Amino acid sequence: MAFKTYFWPAVGAVTVTVSAWLLYKELRGLSLDELGRSFGAISPLNWLLCGLATLLAYAALAGYDRIALLHLGRKIDWLFITVCSFTTYALSHNVGASVVSGGVVRYRAYSSKGLAPAEIGILIAMCSFTFALGTVLLAGLVLILEPGITERFGDLLPMSASAATGYVILALVALYVAGSFLKLRGFAIGPIRIVYPSPRVTLMQLVIAPLELIGAAGIIYFALPEAGNPGFLIVLGIFLVSFSAALISHVPGGLGVLELVFVMGLPDMDPADIIAALLVFRLFYLLIPFAMALVVILLFERSQFASEKPDRPRDDAAP
């Protein structure tokens, strides 16, 4: 138990330390004046586009929960799903250990709607798998369209990849989709039965997950200047690597990991412009939603406390 309790925090701490050291080597000499000029260079239109990209990302994140509930055959009010999903991801993206922190919020919310613990476990697993599926799908497409992208990271990635790798990845995705249409049988893991998703659920996964990732990467893309900008596909590919690495490391907010991967992946751009764009991403995708999520949690817990509080006896009641 003690090992499980301290393992991921230790991994996160080591990752932050290593990332901070490597990032320091990359950003030596960067001044606050340069960073301020980079912020000032972002046009009002691009600020608006960053906001719209954020709305797209969080709207798609609500689709993750909707897909999982559809798979479970459960019908819950769309507004409740949207608020629950927004709160879950705004919290887990900032706190780290997304499965744990997000699981607590989902359990508290969906148990109030009558979902059993096993159903909530399947819902959490389904949301995680949908994200992974979207990441793999977009990674395959990026490798096919931009096969030289892995060269940007040097020795940072443990293995190289090419267009052929992209085709293999898409073939695996196609097998998953084929299994859905062939209605393969499920299997049981203890008390939990894993059922293969229906074609409707699978097709929704292939649309919603990429939209979320495209929206999140779009925040960074619109905050970057045109000078030296390699295009959206490259930015998307770098985002997939950096965000996945941040989630695996369980570093809260991907602190240091996102910055390191982007600075290394965009060597032709001014580091000040890259850091400014990532600060915009953190503001729109992490900090503002996090502040809003805390308010939602407080209001929800207050309503739950009020509904669970027993009625006070009347003063004029007979003894």
Image (cartoon, rainbow, N blue to C red):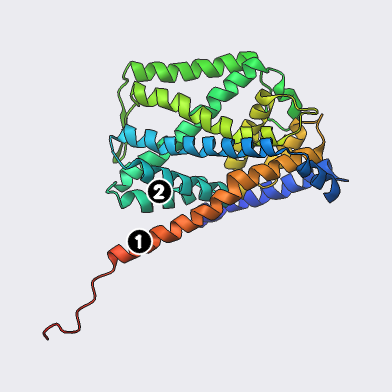
Q: Nearer the viewer, mark 1 or mark 2?
A: 1
Q: Residue 74: where, in percent of width, then height?
A: 28, 38
> Helix or strand or loop: what does disc 1 sit on?
helix
Q: Residue at x 41, y 47 (%)?
A: 84
**Which of the two residues, 93 or 190, is positioned nearer the viewer here?**
93
1 and 2 marks in contact (CB < 8 Å): no
Residue at the disc numbered 1:
303
For the image shown, how many numbered marks are present on the structure? 2
Instruction: Check disc 2 and report the residue beneath it.
Output: 106
Kindly identify the residue that appears in the image at 38 percent across and 33 percent down: 67
Q: Amino acid at mark 1?
A: Ser
Residue 116: image x %, image y %?
29, 47
In the displayed structure, 204 sits above or below 315; it is above
Does the image show residue 254?
A: no
- 297 w.r.t. 187: above or below: below
Q: Residue at x 65, y 23 (%)?
A: 233
